[in-house]
């Protein structure tokens, strides 16, 4: 069993296993803690190996808690809506945005040396799928993908 480590009050139940730090993180905008995975993409077994990426994870949490979480959810819904209509001659419907915005739930955060991934689920509109949102180092959205 992996030994638990303390990484500050933002990161709960952190443990290192198979060169990755897994934990939970609490965001002000979300009721339940969200899974956090930090992958330094190197052989890492000591807490100090993860320190730089833990700091980046804390910065992301602070950014999301500063009111940006809802902005990201809105932008993700808009991107998905526009992509759905991209192949059609019909313009995107803004009426479809609100149900998707309300259905998007952050399930996890992944932190890598080159950026971040937010993993959302949408139980009603995209059941069984995972919506991955790649963020740049400045937290801007780089890519939105839906995986079955």
Image: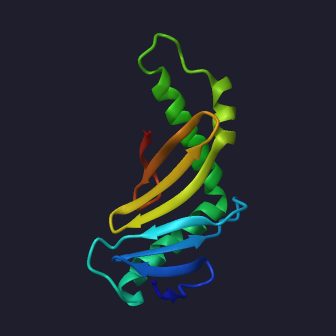
Q: Residue at x 52, y 80 (%)?
A: 14
User: Residue 72's x, y, as percent?
Assistant: 57, 49
Decide if residue 89 is on the left or right side of residue 41.
right
Tell me: 96 left or right of 7: right
Identity of the residue furthest to the top in this view:
89
**Camera-side residue: 27 or 147?**
147
Who's the residue at 44% across and 42% down the image? 144
The image shows residue 145 at horizontal and vertical percentages of 42, 41
Tag count? 0
Given the current orientation, which residue lies at the most extreme left position?
A: 42
Q: Position of residue 130 (x, y in %)?
A: 49, 45
- The picture quadrant where one finds residue 135 is bottom left
Q: Is residue 117 left or right of residue 70?
A: left
Left or right relative to 127: residue 147:
left
Q: Quadrant of residue 110?
A: bottom left
Residue 83, position as x, y percentages in the image: 46, 28
Given residues 134 and 20, the one toward you in this image is: 20
* Residue occupying the point 44% across, 60% down: 138
* 72 in relation to 111, above or below: above
The residue at the far front in this view is 1
Q: Quadrant of residue 98?
A: top right
Q: Is residue 74 above or below residue 59?
A: above
Q: Nearer the viewer, residue 132 or 63?
A: 132
Please determine whether, in this image, residue 112 is positioned above or below residue 12: above
What residue do we see at 40% from left, 56% from top? 136
The quarter in which the C terminus is drawn is top left
């Amino acid at each position: 069993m992996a030994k638990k480590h303390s990484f500050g009050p933002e990161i709960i139940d952190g443990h290192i296993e198979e060169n990755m730090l897994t934990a939970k993180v609490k965001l002000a905008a979300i009721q339940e803690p969200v899974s956090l995975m930090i992958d330094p993409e190197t052989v890492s077994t000591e807490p100090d190996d993860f320190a730089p990426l833990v700091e980046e994870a804390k910065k992301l949490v602070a950014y999301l808690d500063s009111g940006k979480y809802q902005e990201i959810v809105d932008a993700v819904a808009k991107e998905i809506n526009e992509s759905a209509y991209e192949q059609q001659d019909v313009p995107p419907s803004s009426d479809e945005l609100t149900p998707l915005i309300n259905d998007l739930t952050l399930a996890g955060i992944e932190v890598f040396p080159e950026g971040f991934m937010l993993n959302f689920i949408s139980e009603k509109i995209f059941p069984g799928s995972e919506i991955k949102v790649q963020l740049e180092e400045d937290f801007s959205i780089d890519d939105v993908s839906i995986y079955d």
